[in-house]
Amino acid sequence: MNTIKCARRGLAAILVLCSSGVFAQSNELVGDWTIVTTGFSFVGSSTSYLQLTVEESDGVLSAYVYNGPVPFRVNGNEFEFDLDWRSGFDVEYLSTFKGILNEDGLLEGELTHHGANNFLGQPWQDGKFSGTHTEPRPELDGLAPHPVDLSGIWDRAFGLGAVSKIRYAMTDQGQATIDGYLEMDNANSRCASPGLVLASGLPYPMEILYSDNTIVIVYGADYARRIYLDGREFPATATGSSLGFSQGEWKGETLVVTTTELNPAFMSARGQPVSADAYTVEHFYFDDKGYLHADMWLHDPKNYARTPYLRRVYDRDFSPRVITKVDCDPYTFFRALYLEGDLETFWERARFRR
C-alpha cells in the first residue's frame, strides 16, 4: 500500500504517527459508515458494530470510530485503519481493518488481531467485516410527542454490541488525567457508584419503570436513575450525584434525555475522565426490528475535543427474571492495597479521586 507506513511500536506511537490521515485518491470514502464485523467475540460467528466517520480537509482524509481518532491509510479504493479497543475484561488491544470500497459503494474486508490473545491465553480469531453508509436518523426537532412503552427488563442484544473504543480526541487536561490515572482512582474499583456513563454501560440487565411523570431506569440491582418528564428543575439547594439530574422529552417516538449535575467520574477502567461540567444526551428509540437503542453522547469540552459517542442496543427479556444484587465488598479492595503495599499511595492520591 503506497501510503504512510506505521511501525507497530505500540498504541500510543501509532496514534501519534498516523492520526492525521493521508492524501486520498478518492473522496468516496467520506461520510458515516456502519461496520458489522466478526472477530470481537468468543463466538466466532457473532457480530459486533462500530461507527466509522471519514472526513476530508485540504485533500487529507481523517477517520474516527465513535468520534475517537484512528490511524487511517488510503490507496485508491483500498483502505486500512487501526482500532484501539478493550475487551470486557478491560484488556487493551490494537487491531487492523483492511478492506476496499467495492463497485457497489460498500465496504468489505478483513480484520486481524496480529496474534493477540484473550484473557484465557487463546488467540483472538480474526474476522471479516462489511460496511454501509449510515442511515441518518430523522430530524427530531418539531416532532409532536408520541410516547411509546419502554417498560420492561432489557438485556444487551446479542450480536449488536459496539466495539469498546479506548482513545478519543482529548484536550490537554483530559490527556493529563489519563496519563496520571491509576485503577485505584476509579470509584467502581472500591464498590462506589461508577457514574452514569460507566454504570449505563455495565453488562447487567436494565429495567425501565414508569411512575406518573417519571421514568425510572435501574441498572442491575444497584443503580436507580430517575428521568423527569414534567419539566421540573434541579433544586438550588441540591448537590450533584454520580447519576446526575435527568430531564426527558418525547420527540416523536424518541425519548431525548439530557443529564447534568454529574459528579466527576470515569468512562471505564481505562481512565477516560468525565468532568463535573459534563452533560450527556441520550436517545432512546426502537428500530424496525424491535430492538431498543440507547445512544449516548458525552459533552465534556474540558476533556474531549470531539464528543464521544456510545452505542448501546437492547433486547427485551420476556422471562420471569429475578434481578439479584452483584456482591461487592470494598474490604477486598483495601485489603489488596494493604498486601501490595499500595495503601499509602491510595491515601496520597485523594486529589485524583473522582
Image (cartoon, rainbow, N blue to C red):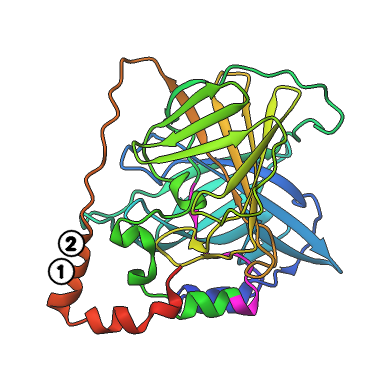
Q: Residue at x 65, y 66 (%)?
A: 304
Relative to 296, say whether 83 is above or below: below
**349 on left or right of 210:** left
Q: Quadrant of residue 174?
A: bottom right
- Look at the numbered discs 2 and 1 and tell me whether their residues touch, using CB distance below 8 Å: yes
Measured as percent of width and height from the top left, residue 259 is found at 63, 47
Residue 157: image quadrant is: top left
Q: Which residues are magenta?
A: 163-173
- Residue at the far front: name it: 237
Q: Where in the figure is residue 87, as x and y percent of width and height?
A: 37, 53
Q: Is residue 73 above or below residue 191?
A: below
Question: Number of labelled discs?
Answer: 2
Prevailing secondary structure class for the magenta stretch in the rendered image: loop
Q: Is residue 6 visible?
A: no
Q: Is residue 351 visible to the viewer in this orientation of the structure?
A: yes
Whole-number angstrom distance, CA of label 2 to CA of label 1? 6 Å
Identify which amino acid the numbered label 1 is placed on.
Arg
The residue carrying mark 2 is: 331
Secondary structure found at label 1: helix
Report the residue marked by disc 1. Answer: 335
Quick one: label 2, few (<14), some, or many (20+) residues within 10 Å?
Answer: few
**Residue 63, x across and y down, in percent:** 68, 60
